[in-house]
Image (cartoon, helix red, strand yellow):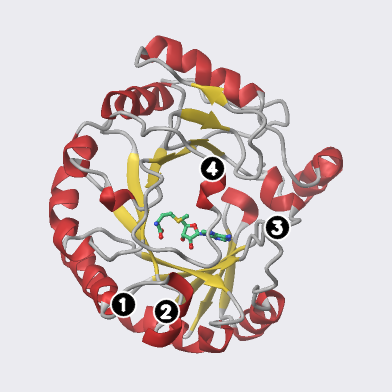
Amino acid sequence: MPSMMKDSFGRKVTGLRIALTPRCNLNCIYCHHEGEANPRGEISDEMVVSVARAAAHLGVRSLKFTGGEPLLRPGLAKLISRMPQELDLSLTTNGIFLAKLAEPLAQAGLDRVNVSLDSLRPEIYREITGCWEGDMEKVLAGIDAAQAAGLEPIKLNVVVLKENEAEIGNLIDFSRDRGLILQLIQLMDLHRSGISGDIDAIERDLASRADRVRTREMHRRKKYFLDGAEVEVVRPMDNTEFCANCTRLRVTSDGKIKPCLLRSDNLVEIGTCDCEKIIELLQEANSRREPYFGKERLPALRSAMMADCPRH
Ligand code: SAM
């Protein structure tokens, strides 16, 4: 049985997020580019496979591919077919190329997908993503194809913006009707653009209407169940609880282990496909993990959480 890594704040690492390319076919107005600044080159298939094996050895259970746009990566199905069987494999995509790829990716061993779709109104979707006319229909066809291929549960990722906050009700209905989990994501407004929607008001409304609320272990994310819909709220900003319950490591598209989305001063260069060596590098990156928000408040928060929830 692999030994699970924990950092010096007692936080486990159970998930790994690998950016397969910095390239993207969209140009979303808010994109944080997974916290990558000037990536050089693209991580090789060999390195991705070795990192996945090393991570699985260290007790990582889920692996998510991201980008850029991961569906732009040539040979993606083949790469997925080489991943360790024990990992839960998912990817996050803008969905534009999903209609064609869903079935081969599922055949290769992909378990599920997150599809980013910030608006159901074509003109707003274009404004946010800079896409071409007709691309939104391709995303909808991609969701259908992912469902047909069994890539479920499908999460619909929506970053809450001024542009789409009036549409949240429609997005909830759409997700419920299509059997999707809606994931409302707080904007990480790294460039202080001021385009963030009012996620506090949205969450208050969800809380007042929910039949049931569940708190997930990862990031202590809240899930609201209402009228058959399932809505998860992701609030990374200024959120001590989010950081205290972060269970992730990341790998950048140019092959560096990244302990935190919001930092670039503590990366670990991989530079090898030797699995044994990568195990050590993952351990090194784990030793560099620390909560971005509320590091100093963490011990108090942890004892409060333990009092709240004795099984932790
Ligand atoms: N192209 C893929 C996609 O669209 O899902 C993968 C890359 S994208 C960076 C991954 C996720 O990060 C998307 O769901 C996107 O909405 C989210 N994201 C990007 N920039 C963000 C920001 N500034 N704040 C919050 N979420 C963001």
**Whether label 1 touches label 2, CB < 8 Å:** yes
Is residue 134 rendered to the left or right of residue 246?
left
- Name the amino acid, label 1: Met
Question: At numbered mark 4, what does the secondary structure look like: helix, strand or loop?
Answer: loop
Residue toward you, 262 or 236: 262
The answer for how far apart the CA atoms under marks 1 and 2 are is 7 Å
Judge whether 41 appears above or below 129 on screen: above
Judge whether 304 appears above or below 191 on screen: above
- First along the sequence among labels 3 and 1: 1
Is residue 244 rendered to the left or right of residue 136?
right
When asked about the image quadrant of residue 126, the answer is bottom left
Q: Which residue is mark 2?
A: 125
Percent x, y of residue 134: 26, 80
Percent x, y of residue 106: 18, 51
Rendered residue at 58%/24% (across/down): 285
Is the CB atom of the residue marked by disc 3 within 8 angstroms of ligand 1's nearest atom? Answer: no
When asked about the image quadrant of residue 36, the answer is top right
Judge whether 13 appears above or below 230 on screen: above
Q: Which residue is mark 4?
A: 36
- Name the amino acid, label 3: Met
Q: Which residue is mark 1?
A: 136
Label 1: few (<14), some (14–19) or many (≥20) C-alpha neighbours in 10 Å: many
Q: Nearer the viewer, mark 4 or mark 3?
A: 4
**Whether label 2 touches label 3, CB < 8 Å:** no
